[in-house]
Image (tube, rainbow, N blue to C red):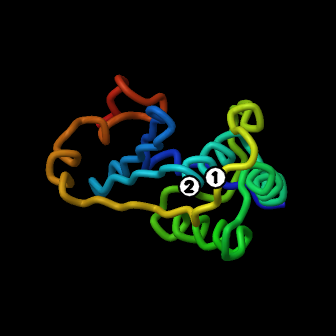
Amino acid sequence: MRHLRPHPERIVYDVIDGQVLIIRSDTGSYYSLEGPAADVWRGLMAGLDDAELMAAIESRYVPDSGDLATDVDAFLASLLREGLVEEGQIDLVTEFAAAVTPAAAWVAPRLQSFTDMQDLLLFDPIHEVGPEGWPHAADG
């Protein structure tokens, strides 16, 4: 089964009040994930493979219309296309299943992309860090 993980050199992310904020440090673009999109992201961060992720999402959401699997596949493709994730297992596995409650209404996950702060984010030294992360500056 396929596993996806955050791209280690390109992004930083945080979850604030259920919303996932992602910054792509090499382009200055930032992204917002809410609702089902945030749950899919948390599932990826929990180390779930494709089948486990779909089972978790299907246990959480009741589809009003559309196809959950198709929507999730399209969303994962957008994460890959934007360079936010890559194939490979995540090192740290957290509890995803306990973080969601069943029977919420399904809304197709959506990746919201923003470029209005690119200059400011690219100016910030966070993209000049080594593999250890902030506050360790990259060599050279």
Q: Secondary structure at mark 1?
A: helix
Task: Locate residue 75 relative to residue 84 in the image: left or right.
Answer: right
The residue under label 2 is which amino acid type? Ala
Image-based side of 107 in relation to 67, left or right: left
- Mark linked to residue 37: 2
Contact between labelled residues 2 and 1, with CB atoms less than 8 Å apart: yes
Instruction: Give how far across and how far down residue 30 sits, in percent.
Output: 33, 52
**Residue 32 point in image, percent of width and height:** 40, 51
In the image, residue 43 sits, relative to residue 29, either above or below, namely above
The Cα–Cα distance between marks 1 and 2, rounded to whole angstroms, is 5 Å
Camera-side residue: 36 or 14? 36
Label 2: which secondary element = helix
Q: Residue at x 20, y 54 (%)?
A: 118
- Residue furthest toward the top? 135
Q: How many marks?
A: 2
> Residue at label 1?
40
Q: Quadrant of the N terminus?
A: bottom right
- Could you say which quadrant of the image residue 13 lies in? top left
At 41% from the left and 47% from the top, the residue drawn is 22
Residue 15 picture location, percent across and down: 48, 35
Q: Where is 60 relative to 67, above or below?
A: above
Dot 1: within a 10 Å radius of its alpha carbon, few (fewer than 14), some, or many (20 or more) residues? many
| Residue 17, placed above or below residue 41 | above
Type of amino acid at the residue the image marks with label 1: Val
Determine whether, in the image, residue 84 is placed left or right of residue 5: left
Asked which quadrant contains residue 95, the reply is: top right
Q: Residue at x 15, y 46 (%)?
A: 120
Toward the viewer: 44 or 19?
Answer: 19
Which residue lies at the image location 35% right of the left edge and 34% below the top edge? 129
Q: Residues within 10 Å of mark 2 (few under 14, many from 20)?
A: many
